[in-house]
Image (tube, helix red, strand yellow):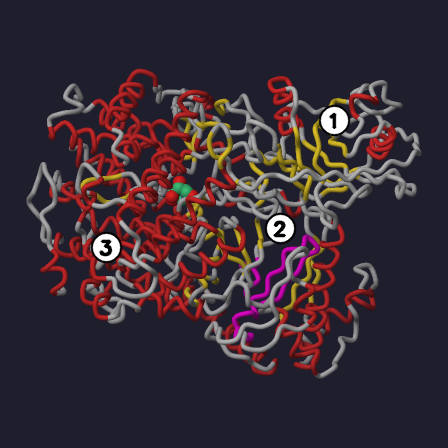
Amino acid sequence: MSEAGEGGGRVAGSPLPRRAPWSLVAATATLCLVSATSVWTAGAAPMSREEKQKLGNQVLEMFDHAYGNYMEHAYPADELMPLTCRGRVRGQEPSRGDVDDALGKFSLTLIDSLDTLVVLNKTKEFEDAVRKVLRDVNLDNDVVVSVFETNIRVLGGLLGGHSLAIMLREKGEYMQWYNDELLQMAKQLGYKLLPAFNTTSGLPYPRINLKFGIRKPEARTGTETDTCTACAGTLILEFAALSRFTGATIFEEYARKALDFLWEKRQRSSNLVGVTINIHTGDWVRKDSGVGAGIDSYYEYLLKAYVLLGDDSFLERFNTHYDAIMRYISQPPLLLDVHIHKPMLNARTWMDALLAFFPGLQVLKGDIRPAIETHEMLYQVIKKHNFLPEAFTTDFRVHWAQHPLRPEFAESTYFLYKATGDPYYLEVGKTLIENLNKYARVPCGFAAMKDVRTGSHEDRMDSFFLAEMFKYLYLLFADKEDIIFDIEDYIFTTEAHLLPLWLSTTNQNISKKNTTSEYTELDDSNFDWTCPNTQILFPNDPLYAQSIREPLKNVVDKSCPRGIIRVREESFRSGAKPPLRARDFMATNPEHLEILKKMGVSLIHLKDGRVQLVQHAIQAASSIDAEDGLRFMQEMIELSSQQQKEQQLPPRAVQIVSHPFFGRVVLTAGPAQFGLDLSKHKETRGFVASSKPYNGCSELTNPEAVMGKIALIQRGQCMFAEKARNIQNAGAIGGIVIDDNEGSSSDTAPLFQMAGDGKDTDDIKIPMLFLFSKEGSIILDAIREHEEVEVLLSDKARDRDAEMESEEQTSSENDSQNQSAEQVISLSQTFDLVDQESPDESSVHSHLEPTSPAETPDATSISPSGETSNPTESHETTSLDGECTDIDNQLEEQSETEEDSSPNVSWGKKVQPIDSILADWNEDIEAFEMMEKDEL
Ligand code: DMJ
């Protein structure tokens, strides 16, 4: 135990001030968060108390805007739909797939917000909210919900609410009437979740019917075989708290059993776990491993279970995994997924946004340096795109452009500030606040970003936004006296619900499996039981955090596309060409197939009719053929990427700029293959008017109404180009086609671009955009309410705070063509996104990855779907201290120009010639085969 731990040992809050033996360690973890704020002397300028208070008040105002609109327009529904300003009721909206499994018709957002109200000092509102929960919430609905989401959001929300309700009751002013009713509800819900654990493994089913449980015919669930590791491993805090609060030990026992099983199943050589596991057999279904989606909170709960429950085995497990993470996944500042059996090989070339929680966890662990590095890298990505895109590549391009207002980065910012006291993190928080207000705030709440590149919105405000984002932002700027209780008496669950640390010494009679003997061989000398004493570290070197951040300052702007390209560059430098050029390749040509075989490239016909190419260098006829195969694959990757770009146009934005929207609502629109290209020209701005006839399929009868305006036209009955010509002839300066399929939305349907009519469309000069029905109805509703509605058509939303300048681009040439059908080109590959928290594997970006790269760890694979995986990356150069080549630049995002070099930045891996790569492959494959045998 460190001196720091003992010196920092503080007495936990009431009702049970007694400390268990582990408390010093918990205090040590707490101590990591006890910062040196008062001694900061250099680096970022200190922030005055007034400025902090101003920002804290801004957070309160933003919370009121989000919560107030939810309560006014959505409650008792689960969530607010901030664009259409109503509640999201499951079954009444088009299904969004697994994301909807969080919605159980139990007023999710209200429950998830309970303890936020207390943290934000809104005690009166908390009291009202608790009364509403007790009066209105039904936990017995015939609805299938995610066990994971229900646990972290609803059970956690009820327990967090209960924890703070009894704290307030004890203080003697508020909640005097409270008789543990929230806890009774939590217990009722706990019993409803228990049937999910009825598996031989003890791992829970991913879903349960709140009314009928599992497997009954009425339940409509219980046939699943897989779950994600986080889904099965993120229960212990809530379940143990429930057991300790109520004395009913069964909950903690079940959660422990699931954790024990996951621990048993870890890959024994690497000590890593996969993303999804079969709940019956315990086999890993997805063998890739990272710290983001699908695994994240499993690690979080091991460490926090130790802090809350004081059980050493949890810390030992955490340390074992942490050692593996730092060995294989952490490539500072990146965190890259690897394969559990071959952890030296990367499984992906991109990172997901959920991993942004990890620096916060590292702070709790006490490993500050990599936390600072990763956080800084994430901040650079945010500065580039305003928000963290759902996924971004290792060279920081957008991979999935969505951003559902996730709180993980704010969480890590808070913990880093607590640990370092560096005012830099307050400035980071300020930027987050500004971006939320500038880009996500809409008149009826805050809307998720549909596409961070265009600034367009989704009609979605997830409950975690209220549970987590406002808590962490408020706490970041709050001084001790701004909060009515001592926050350090509590631990944050993964949903930021607060559980009191005194639970550790309450009702401890849970039977524990003693597994400590398994750890004797572990060398955890680098990851010992203490964390650095930040009270010594930071005052001694106030520039410590800054000195770690400094080399990373330009990491995003100065980066070059890396990895796969580098190998190609190396091999092309010699001028060598593969015997078969990618552009000539035909999958039906037997000669070509023969050449592929020689090069070790095999062809896999996917179920959906596409083909996937996989190279196994070891299967090539010779090492020269293997090199040729590598070159062929690189050409193929480039070709595929180019083809994809040709097929895809990024989405466009329709921004409502008139009162009361003032640019705050941005709708995702599909582009047209004809008319003014908004990516090349300035935006078009104008008032909207409906055309008559509304389908725009004949000469307009109301040209005076659409003259000089942007015409609204309904989809259907004739070609898009014909509609465009008709409105152009009537003098419109632009057109918006609104889908005639009622209920369609870009939230649930893939965007597409409107195709021409097969003839010359050069005569169409005005811009044309497409809106699905739901987005279109936002404009139609606005006209009904406000008559004059002005919009901006563009490729990217404009700064909504600046006064919008009028911009008109009109052109009209008369011509019209008649056709009988529309043509549509699908853009679904890029924009068909799925939620990262999906509890089962089948839902996780299956569209983008028909064959998991993790299944071919020793191979370079590419499919015409555009998703490429190249595990050879881990052998390739990642040192970026050279110049990007033109070829590299071809792969950059269409609209972005990035700088050509990245001096001073090294990812810590070395350039390797191809011979050596191939030799390594062989070694890896042998090691892999050995491991597989061992496991059998
Ligand atoms: C939250 O519900 C929790 O933090 C969870 O562990 C991960 N995802 C969301 C927020 O992004």
Q: Which residues are magenta?
A: 853-879
Ligand 1 placement by image quarter: top left
Residue located beneath label 2 in the image = 850
Residue located beneath label 1 in the image = 712
Q: Which mark is residue 824?
A: none
Asked if residue 397 shows in the view, the reply is yes
Q: Secondary structure at mark 1?
A: strand
> Badge 2 local density, few (<14 within 10 Å), some, or many (20+)?
some
Q: Residue at x 44, y 45 (%)?
A: 434
Residue located beneath label 3 in the image = 33
Q: Secondary structure at mark 3?
A: helix
Find the residue positioned furthest to the top. Answer: 135
Q: Residue at x 68, y 52 (%)?
A: 865
Q: Is residue 751 left or right of residue 314?
A: right
Q: What's the amino acid at mark 3? A: Leu
Image location (x, y in percent) of residue 834? 55, 42
Q: Earlier in the sequence, mark 1 or mark 3?
A: 3
Q: What's the amino acid at mark 2? A: Pro
From what the image shows, is residue 178 above or below residue 889? above
- What distance separates the C-alpha of mark 2 from that of mark 3? 43 Å
- What distance separates the C-alpha of mark 2 from that of mark 1? 38 Å
Query: Residue 13 lies in magenta, yes or no?
Result: no
Q: What's the amino acid at mark 1? A: Leu
Q: Is residue 447 left or right of residue 47?
A: right
Query: Residue 862 lies in magenta, yes or no?
Result: yes
From what the image shows, is residue 33 above or below residue 155? below
From what the image shows, is residue 482 above or below residue 260? above
